[in-house]
Image (cartoon, rainbow, N blue to C red):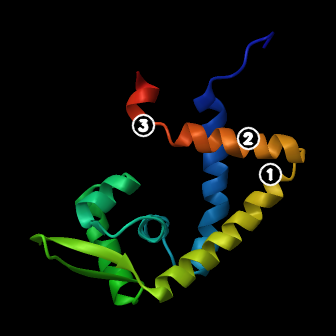
Amino acid sequence: MTGRRRDLAAMIVPLERALIAAELPILRAHGLSMWAYAVLTAVDEGPIRTQVALAQAIGADKTRIIGVLDELQQAGLIERRPDPADRRARLVSITEKGRKLRRTAQAAIQANEDRVLARLPAAERAAFLRALAVLSALPPAEITG
């Protein structure tokens, strides 16, 4: 490769796969699936949302997350209640127990990420994280053109 870089997807996808592989045992140790962690994260970081909006936020089919939501509710990690504005919709919120579990799992995940990020000098690490935050916040339509 003379003066050319690899495609972004060619660099990001293997990194993503390795990071997910590193997360799975951590999540299992906390009794969470990847989808359950995604739901807890979305609900913890954002306002109360409907199940449909939640599915869109995490990139899942709304029918796919119903079982995950059932499990999380049975474990006391989330609550679902009818939306007063639309009785057909269900509002999803995280419980304190769910928030604590999600944050504990996230701390373990990020401890491993910090170990990986430590391969970069501090200034490059900070720049990488800033750039990643900007690019990951782009709307998909802006990326696809």
- Pointer 3 or 2: first along the chain: 2
Residue type of the residue flagged with mark 3: Pro
Report crowding for label 3: few under 14, some 14 to 19, many 20 or more residues within 10 A (C-alpha): few
Residue that extends furthest to the right in the rendered view of this protein: 121
Do we see residue 120 in this rendering? Answer: no
Residue type of the residue flagged with mark 2: Phe
Residue annotated with mark 2? 128
Residue annotated with mark 3? 139
Q: How far is the residue under mark 3 from the one under mark 1?
A: 26 Å
Would residue 136 be found to the left or right of residue 23 on screen?
left
Contact check, label 2 and label 1, Cβ < 8 Å: yes
Dot in front, 3 or 1: 3
Contact check, label 3 and label 1, Cβ < 8 Å: no
Q: Residue at x 68, y 72 (%)?
A: 107
Report crowding for label 2: few under 14, some 14 to 19, many 20 or more residues within 10 A (C-alpha): some
Residue type of the residue flagged with mark 1: Leu
Q: Which mark is residue 117?
A: 1
